[in-house]
Amino acid sequence: MYRITMTYVHDKEEALDVMQDSFHKALTYFEKGEDIEHFAAWFYRILIRTAIDAWRKQKRYRFEPFEEASSVGVDPSEISTKELYEVLEGIDSPEKEILILHFFEGFRLKEIAEILDLNENTVKTKMYRSLNLLRKILQ
């Protein structure tokens, strides 16, 4: 959860606030007594939407300096998780979400489709395109 939140807000304190707000929203929903069929997908949808809202509020005031691209021809086995996150920063948000949910959080494509409220074939297509883009960036 923390990793997904950090992909949007890039600040530890803000990420913790987003997670707390997400838990609060989930508990408020539970108080209504309604059933939830796929809890993980449902909660991640709340988390992502809350993180997007926080990012929108934050982006008005955020300044990111230009950083040079990393060297070309990097061996994927030598890439650390931190470096992979830095590469993921160059990918559009929906594609980045799919990659993080699948490879870091362990969700299947069908579950990702539920979380992001997308068709499963759309998720597959975005995953394929994102992986191709990652290959190009890492070469």
Image (tube, rainbow, N blue to C red):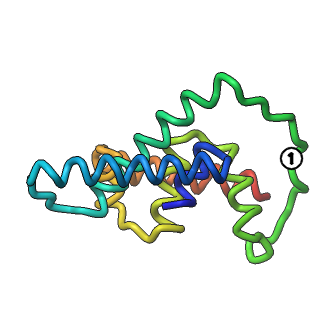
Q: Where in the figure is residue 30, as x and y percent of width and height?
A: 18, 54
Q: Where in the figure is residue 66, as x and y percent of width and height?
A: 86, 35
39 to 34, vertically: above or below? below
73 to 122, vertically: above or below? below
Which residue is painted at 49% across and 37% down in the image?
52
Q: Residue furthest top?
A: 60
How many numbered marks does the figure carry? 1
Q: Residues within 10 Å of mark 1 (few under 14, many from 20)?
A: few
- Side (left or right) of 111 relative to 34: right
- Side (left or right) of 106 relative to 81: left
Which residue is painted at 32% across and 56% down in the image?
43
Q: Where in the figure is residue 86, as x and y percent of width and height?
A: 74, 53
- Side (left or right) of 121 relative to 127: left
Which residue is painted at 11% across and 48% down in the image?
32
Q: Nearer the viewer, residue 96 or 31?
A: 31
Query: What is the quadrant of the C terminus in the image?
Result: bottom right
Q: Nearer the viewer, residue 12 or 83?
A: 12
Q: Secondary structure at mark 1?
A: loop
Amino acid type assigned to the residue bearing label 1 in the image: Ala
- Side (left or right) of 121 relative to 105: left
Q: Where in the figure is residue 70, as x and y percent of width and height?
A: 87, 53
Which residue is painted at 69% across and 43% down in the image?
90
Residue topped by disc 1: 69
